Image (tube, rainbow, N blue to C red):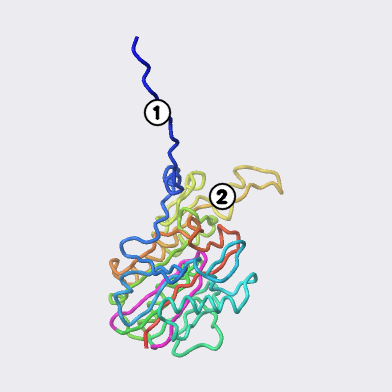
Amino acid sequence: MKPLKKMRPRIKKRVSAAAKRDALGHKPNIRARADWKELRAGTATILQAKPLTRIKWIVHGFSTREGGSSKLGSEQVLNLGFTDWDSRPTVESNRKRFLDALGAGKLDLAVLRQIHSDVIHTVERSLATPLQGDALISNSPGIILGVQTADCVPILLADTRNRAVAAIHAGWRGTLSRIAAKTIGRMQMEFGARPADIVAAIGPAIHRCSYEVGPEVAQAFAGQFPQAREWFDIPRELSSGMRDGEIVAGEGPNPLKWLLMTPPGHDPPPPTVQLDLVAANRWQLTDAGVCEVNISASDLCTACHTDLLFSHRREQGHTGRMMAAIGIRV
């Protein structure tokens, strides 16, 4: 009779959180890829597009939630927007920390009271009070332009020939209104910019995987952009019966209402589609003449990475604001 083989005790292998996400099919939390880099300043983390860092006369950065003095629940965060849960002195201190980390502590910060529009302002000197709008352009040294986001698309532009910059806030309404393309048009009129000379960076924003909108939004995009169908993931119940030029079948916010014949007051929630705002804004930039190779777009989805970024949608409104900023050195 053969002796029994000695059995080794089984040791349970520890699985990292990242491996668990991968097993579930989620993207790993990759903060930077080939054309992006992290700037660490104390406990703060700032993201930068490498093509913009090579332009020595500008300073730029996309903030994250890390490294601030604001208290959000049990977390210390870098909130750069004036919200009802945070104090003005704390936000101002966070903004100073952000600008100092960029090496822009001596530049005057110009920001907006954002209204989800296509309103663009030219800034020549520091602003005593924020202007209403959603994009800023400047060719004045000593000014740094900033837009705030917590899901919407932040876009920074630099005209390498004429030394002009822009900061754009593009939600779905601004994207529908072509604010990115219009900002390039304003730079052409004001500064003589040529789109081929513009370098663009699209920062972290909510991505297609997490951004649900109603069919009426999809139809509005279809009315403005012939290629809008490429920017949407459409559920089967909405895509069946589509006509040419449609993104969803039927009209109104719930085209399934009469098909389902539910009693009054018991309508099902309107079906939704998923919109790729980053792709829509990238297309606007290239359609305006910006070279594809001159556009860097972050892979980070704000809703998927609330460990690093603020997301108004994922955090149900109780969150902070990040800032995308760009300016011309003195």
Q: Quadrant of residue 193?
A: bottom left
Tell which of 55 and 160 is nearer to you. 55
Tell which of 231 and 202 is nearer to you. 202
Task: Check disc 2 and give the amino acid type.
Answer: Pro
Q: Give the label on residue 271, or none.
A: 2
Describe residue 298's horizontal placement relative to residue 117 as left or right. left
Disc 1 and disc 2: Cα gap in Å? 55 Å
Question: Mark 1 against mark 2, which lies toward the viewer?
Answer: 1
Q: Residue at x 41, y 63 (%)?
A: 280
Quadrant placement of the N terminus = top left
Q: Residue at x 38, y 88 (%)?
A: 141
Q: If you read the primary sequence from the N terminus, does the residue marked by circle 1 or circle 2 appear first?
A: 1
Q: Residues within 10 Å of mark 2 (few under 14, many from 20)?
A: some
Tell which of 329 and 289 is nearer to you. 329
Badge 1 element: loop
Q: Residue at x 54, y 70 (%)?
A: 79
Q: Residues within 10 Å of mark 1 (few under 14, many from 20)?
A: few
**Residue 279 magenta-highlighted:** no
Q: Which residues are magenta?
A: 141-161
Q: Which residue is disc 1 drawn over?
A: 8
Q: How many marks?
A: 2
Task: Check disc 1 and give the amino acid type.
Answer: Arg
Magenta residues: mostly which secondary structure? Answer: strand
Residue 289 horizontal/vertical position (percent): 31, 72
Q: Residue at x 39, y 63 (%)?
A: 298
Image height of 156 relative to 191, above or below: above
Describe residue 90's horizontal placement relative to residue 159 as left or right. right
Image height of 20 relative to 280, above or below: above
Residue situated furthest bottom in the rendering: 125
